[in-house]
Image (cartoon, rainbow, N blue to C red):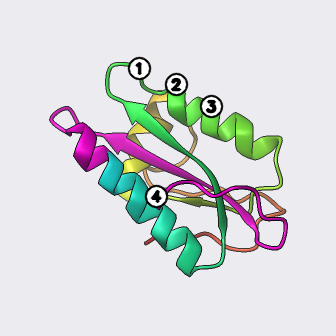
């Protein structure tokens, strides 16, 4: 499954994951599909998956934060909290690694 076409009946979500240095394109595609499957099961419309590449960090995280701020997104779906901690540190995020700051619009956070 890939990111959904926009469905106004379901809450909007974005996906985020860090591609590790030895990750193949097939493994990356599988990870994206897992996020899309989870989003569908939980009733979200997955708009896009932001992939952080180690050599470009924190570009994807920064783009994700900008997109969440200007959208009606209610969730960011990640494979696990370990995908967020390094990006938040590089982006100058406040709080301990893995700390989440929710948007006032967000109804819930989703983690598979």
Residue lying farthest to the left in this orientation: 22
- Residue carrying label 3: 63
Spatial CA distance of label 4 from label 3 is 15 Å
Badge 2: residue crowd in 10 Å (few <14, some 14–19, many ≥20): some
- Residue carrying label 1: 56
- Identify the residue at horizontal 58%, vertical 41% (top origin): 94
Q: Do the residues labelled 4 and 2 touch (CB within 8 Å)?
A: no
Name the spot of residue 80 as percent of width and height, x first. 38, 61
Magenta residue check for 25 = yes
The mark tally for this picture is 4
Q: Is residue 20 left or right of residue 103?
A: left
SS class, disc 2: helix
Spatial CA distance of label 1 from label 3 is 12 Å
Work out whether mark 1 precedes mark 3 in sequence or the reverse, and give the earlier one.
Answer: 1
Q: In this view, does 52 lie to the left or right of 61?
A: left
Name the spot of residue 40 as percent of width and height, x first. 57, 73
Q: Do the residues labelled 1 and 4 touch (CB within 8 Å)?
A: no
Q: Are marks 2 and 1 in contact (CB under 8 Å)?
A: yes
Magenta span = 1-28
- Residue carrying label 4: 78
Spatial CA distance of label 4 from label 2 is 16 Å
- Identify the residue at horizontal 76%, vertical 68% (top origin): 11
Q: Are marks 3 and 2 in contact (CB under 8 Å)?
A: yes
Q: Is residue 45 left or right of residue 9?
A: left
Badge 4: residue crowd in 10 Å (few <14, some 14–19, many ≥20): many
- Residue carrying label 2: 59
Name the spot of residue 91 as percent of width and height, x first. 53, 29
Name the spot of residue 23 as percent of width and height, x first. 20, 39
SS class, disc 3: helix
Q: Is residue 23 left or right of residue 52?
A: left
Spatial CA distance of label 3 from label 2 is 6 Å
Q: Which of the pair 27/103 is nearer the observer?
A: 27
């Amino acid at each position: 499954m890939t990111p959904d076409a926009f469905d106004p009946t379901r809450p909007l979500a974005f996906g985020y994951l860090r591609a590790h240095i030895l990750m193949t394109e097939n493994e990356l595609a599988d990870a994206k599909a897992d996020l899309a499957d989870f989003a569908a099961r939980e009733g979200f419309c997955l708009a896009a998956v932001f992939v952080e590449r180690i050599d470009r960090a924190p570009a994807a995280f920064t783009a994700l934060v900008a997109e969440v701020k200007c959208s009606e997104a209610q969730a960011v779906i990640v494979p696990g909290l370990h995908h967020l901690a390094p990006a938040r540190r590089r982006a100058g995020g406040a709080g301990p690694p893995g700390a989440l700051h929710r948007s006032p619009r967000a109804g819930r956070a989703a983690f598979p």
